[in-house]
């Protein structure tokens, strides 16, 4: 019997796009990709957004999302070309031979049905197992994937378990009908790093124990290096490089792959604290209306002029709440904030226009932070009018200056946000906040929604601008690599408290507290076998205790 | 207490409060109309003296608020007062006619609700293809034509020309269920046509909206057939919006039946109300108003409660 499970030849995928005000156009998004996958092996598909990796993954189930259509090529699964198969045969393939694990298990589970009903559905539907057998198998998988209370977790509803647990349930859902191939589409991207490592290990062990083959799709090379045997690097629907994991990571041939491997090459020398901080947060305790517990407990941090304080933590640690308190959107219950030598009113309504001008903000989602019906020029010009009363030629000149500073240039002035890429949008948002000539900018996860190379460019730009404009950044992020790249001092937040705070060199050097240690060691590193090392290390430690 | 029980009780309490508000509004509006019951009774023969005497006799001289609470007290005890024209007890007359109206509405609902939901599911299954367009075209046409026109057209063709059904939907206690159903077939059909479109469109929209969800993709990638995906995965999540529109239409069936009852001379609430209005029988109008309000509020309250019960997050808190 042939060992090739999945054979893709010259796969071409098209989509219909609807540009505003123009006729619908058919475009090609994957331009002839070929690869083979043997039984029990794992192929990593890696690339930035728009590379076509999810589209290729779904094509192995003969599925096109939205208006996406497979326009050419062959996809052979178990010895037949599924693009030429009948409707009924494709249905048997989906869920029976090939299963899918999506990025957001929270959205992919039906909120109205119990987890068990959804996990066993495909196995029962394709008559692989009886309902009873399938439930038994599901419980085994729950246990194998390290879910708590595997015998009863199936009788819960999706909203009753955590995000990391649900992602594992999704893996169980995919493995339950004993498929030959599982398509993992960014299965750990939406998780916190400390959760990601557990889910990653659970997935890896499940793949090994069941002997299933997998397509592992991600934008994170360090993650894919841990689980796959081979890696295919994709860019704009074209194969850039295809080889063994070892070769891609340790000996990349193509320039683009080398850039991906060496990303985060920013060197930033830590600056010394000044006697006079621009922002000092003292004893802040805060809670949201309607909650009966505090979200922030006695938070104390300082930010010095022209420097960067990184506030790092996982979801729910209180880092965004801290930003809301500083901006005045959420008046604290206790504590005070001193900014540029004066006490800030806890409430936004009590702040002067000067307070507002000197403290600007950049958000994670650049596209929703801009009015889609205003041009870039209008967007950047607004703070110039509002704070400096600039009009006409003077305003225009300043807008062009700002556009040059963010490396976009005058030609972008009359464009609308919809015409910009993600990175360009974020640059416009940066220019808009700089237009106010602030002393400090709060950057809330500004690179989290961007691809690594684009994010790198934004970080470099922010550092350059810091030198020119002497602006301080309060940089909120969950990504420790970003923290390393740009910060002067770091505050690690955990459950509403500052777990560790100080200059970068000190925070990132041992001895660590338990949480910072866990956080730092959970960041995937780009070498083979990292996952096993960390997990083995943790097992030893817990055995030692 | 389980939070869901609390929510349901809140809805019930709100419904009752709303009913009191509605009763006050109905009473206030009839008060604001020119003329009163005494004038209505005496009509052309009214002299200032006889008017004053009758008002004294009927207690109309007392302040409106006192009369309102008296009236309300009566309603709470099930006493809706006396008709001015035939001096009969209103509760008794309404009881029978409400039964008839509910019978007609129920028959129309039993036909229209499953039909509307089925057509909605069918329209989603064949979205933007000819079955979808045909269903939309027909239901939208029937909802766009006033029901009395449909009624008269049907009477002309089916009753007069073909003679299949009677043009008068008279029913009485001596008839068997089968005879009754035969008698009300035409009005029930007209009502079905009127409410079908909205329920069908809403079902279609609610389910189409859900079809974009990631969990629908998951279901498709499990290899389920399109109809299984819709029925098993989309429909349970669409219950809440669908129940809402169904209840609104049921309320319309009871309250809006007036016109259809008049067309087919059906002995229901609608005809009773229209008679009372032409005869200026204020207590009957008031009573009918309150009964209609109670039905409307009651059905919407049921819709709210079903929506709460259909939400798994509320049913099974963490």
Image: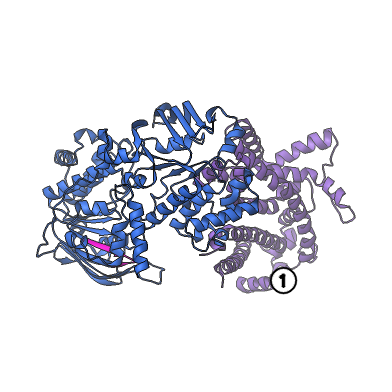
Q: Quadrant of the C terminus of chain A?
A: bottom left
Residue numbers of the magenta segment? A490-497
Query: In the rendered view, does B186 fall on the left or right side of A384?
Result: right
Number of residue marks:
1
Q: Position of residue B125 (x, y in %)?
A: 61, 38
Q: Which chain is purple?
A: B
Q: Residue at the left extreme?
A: A275
Give the color scheme: rainbow, by chain, secondary structure or one colour.
by chain
Answer yes or no: is residue A323 visible.
yes
Position above or below: B254 against B3: above
Position above or below: A339 against B164: below
Q: Position of residue B160 (x, y in %)?
A: 83, 35
Q: Circle 1 sits on which residue?
A: B58
Q: Residue at the right extreme?
A: B174
Position above or below: B76 against A48: below
Q: Mark 1 falls within which chain?
A: B
Query: In the rendered view, does B263 fall on the left or right side of B128?
Result: right
Q: Position of residue A190 (x, y in %)?
A: 39, 51
- Is residue A493 magenta-colored? yes
The residue sitting at 51% across, 30% down in the picture is: A76
Element carrying mark 1: helix
Q: Quadrant of residue A275?
A: bottom left
Query: In the rendered view, does B295 fall on the left or right side of B180?
Result: left
Q: Residue at the front extreme?
A: A1
- Is residue A289 magenta-colored? no
Please name the color used to draw chain A. blue
Q: Quadrant of the N terminus of chain A?
A: top right
Per the picture, the main secondary structure of the magenta-coloured stretch is strand
Position above or below: B140 against A341: above
């Amino acid at each position: 019997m042939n060992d090739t499970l999945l054979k893709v030849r010259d796969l071409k995928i098209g989509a219909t796009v609807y540009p505003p005000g123009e006729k619908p156009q058919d475009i090609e998004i994957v331009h002839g990709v070929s690869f083979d996958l043997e039984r029990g092996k794992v192929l990593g598909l890696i690339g930035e957004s728009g590379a076509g990796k999810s589209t290729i993954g779904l094509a192995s189930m003969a599925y096109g999302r939205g208006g996406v259509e497979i326009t050419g090529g062959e996809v052979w699964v178990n010895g037949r070309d599924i693009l030429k198969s009948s409707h009924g045969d494709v249905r048997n393939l989906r869920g029976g031979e090939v299963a899918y694990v999506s990025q957001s298990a929270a959205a992919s589970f039906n909120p109205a049905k119990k987890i068990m009903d959804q996990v066993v559905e495909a196995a029962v539907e394709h008559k692989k197992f009886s309902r009873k057998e399938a439930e038994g198998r599901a419980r085994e998988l729950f246990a194998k994937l390290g879910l708590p209370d595997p015998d009863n977790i199936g009788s819960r509803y999706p909203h009753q378990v955590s995000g990391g647990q649900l992602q594992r349930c999704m893996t169980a859902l995919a493995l339950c009908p004993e498929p030959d191939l599982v398509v993992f589409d960014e299965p750990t991207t939406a998780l916190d790093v400390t959760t990601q490592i557990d889910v990653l290990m659970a997935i890896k062990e499940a793949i090994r124990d069941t002997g299933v083959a997998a397509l592992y799709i991600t934008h994170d090379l360090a993650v894919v290096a841990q689980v796959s045997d081979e890696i295919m690097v994709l860019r704009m629907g074209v194969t850039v490089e295809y080889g063994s994991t070892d070769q891609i990571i340790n000996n990349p041939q193509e320039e683009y792959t080398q850039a991906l491997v060496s990303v985060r090459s920013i060197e930033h020398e830590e600056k010394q604290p000044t006697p006079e901080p621009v922002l000092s947060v003292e004893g802040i305790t805060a809670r949201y209306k309607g909650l009966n517990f505090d979200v922030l407990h006695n938070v104390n941090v300082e930010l010095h002029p022209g420097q960067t304080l990184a506030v790092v933590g996982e979801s729910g640690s209180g880092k965004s709440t801290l930003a809301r308190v500083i901006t005045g959107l959420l008046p604290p219950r206790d504590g005070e904030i001193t900014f540029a030598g004066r006490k800030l009113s806890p409430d936004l309504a009590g702040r002067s226009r000067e307070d507002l001008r000197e403290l600007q903000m950049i958000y994670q989602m650049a596209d929703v932070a801009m009015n889609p019906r205003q041009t870039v020029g209008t967007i950047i010009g607004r703070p110039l009018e509002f704070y400096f009363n600039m009009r006409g030629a003077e305003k225009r000149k300043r807008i062009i200056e700002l556009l040059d500073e963010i490396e976009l240039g005058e030609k972008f002035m009359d464009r609308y946000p919809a015409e910009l890429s993600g990175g360009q949008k974020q640059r416009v948002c940066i220019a808009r906040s700089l237009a106010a000539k602030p002393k400090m900018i709060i950057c809330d996860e500004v690179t989290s929604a961007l691809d690594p190379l684009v994010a790198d460019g934004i970080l470099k730009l922010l550092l350059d601008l810091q030198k020119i404009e002497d602006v301080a950044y309060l940089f909120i992020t969950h990504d420790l690599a970003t923290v390393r790249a740009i910060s002067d001092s770091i505050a690690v937040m955990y459950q509403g408290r500052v777990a560790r705070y100080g200059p970068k060199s000190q925070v990132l050097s041992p001895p660590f507290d338990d949480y910072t240690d866990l956080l730092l060691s959970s960041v995937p590193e780009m070498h083979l076998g990292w996952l096993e090392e960390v997990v083995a290390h943790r097992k030893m430690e817990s055995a030692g205790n | 207490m389980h939070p869901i029980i609390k929510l349901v009780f809140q809805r019930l309490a709100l419904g009752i409060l709303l009913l009191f508000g509605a009763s006050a509004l109905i009473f206030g509006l009839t008060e604001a109309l020119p003329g009163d019951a005494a004038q209505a009774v005496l009509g052309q023969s009214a002299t200032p003296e006889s008017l004053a005497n009758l008002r004294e006799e009927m207690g109309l001289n007392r302040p409106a608020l006192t009369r309102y609470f008296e009236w309300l007290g009566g309603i709470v005890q099930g006493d809706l007062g006396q008709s001015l024209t035939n001096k009969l007890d209103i509760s008794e007359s309404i009881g029978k006619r409400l039964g008839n109206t509910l019978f007609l509405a129920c028959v129309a609902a039993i036909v229209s609700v499953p039909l509307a939901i089925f057509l909605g599911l069918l329209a989603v299954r064949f979205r933007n293809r000819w079955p979808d367009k045909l269903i939309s075209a027909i239901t939208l046409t029937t909802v766009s034509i006033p029901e009395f026109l449909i009624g008269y057209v049907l009477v002309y063709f089916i009753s007069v020309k073909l003679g299949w059904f009677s043009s008068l939907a008279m029913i009485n206690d001596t008839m068997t269920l089968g005879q009754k159903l035969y008698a009300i077939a035409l009005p029930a059909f007209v009502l079905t046509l009127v409410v079908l479109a909205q329920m069908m469109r809403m079902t279609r929209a609610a389910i189409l909206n859900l079809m974009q969800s990631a969990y629908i993709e998951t279901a498709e990638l499990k290899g389920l057939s399109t109809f299984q995906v819709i029925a098993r995965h989309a429909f349970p999540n669409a219950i809440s919006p669908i129940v809402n529109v169904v209840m609104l239409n049921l309320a319309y069936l009871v309250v809006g039946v007036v016109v259809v009852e008049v067309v087919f001379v059906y002995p229901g609430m609608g005809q009773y109300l229209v008679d009372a209005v032409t005869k200026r029988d204020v207590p009957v109008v008031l009573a009918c108003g309150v009964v209609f309000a109670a039905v409307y509020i009651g059905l919407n309250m049921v819709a709210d409660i079903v929506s709460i019960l259909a939400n798994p997050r509320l049913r099974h808190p963490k």
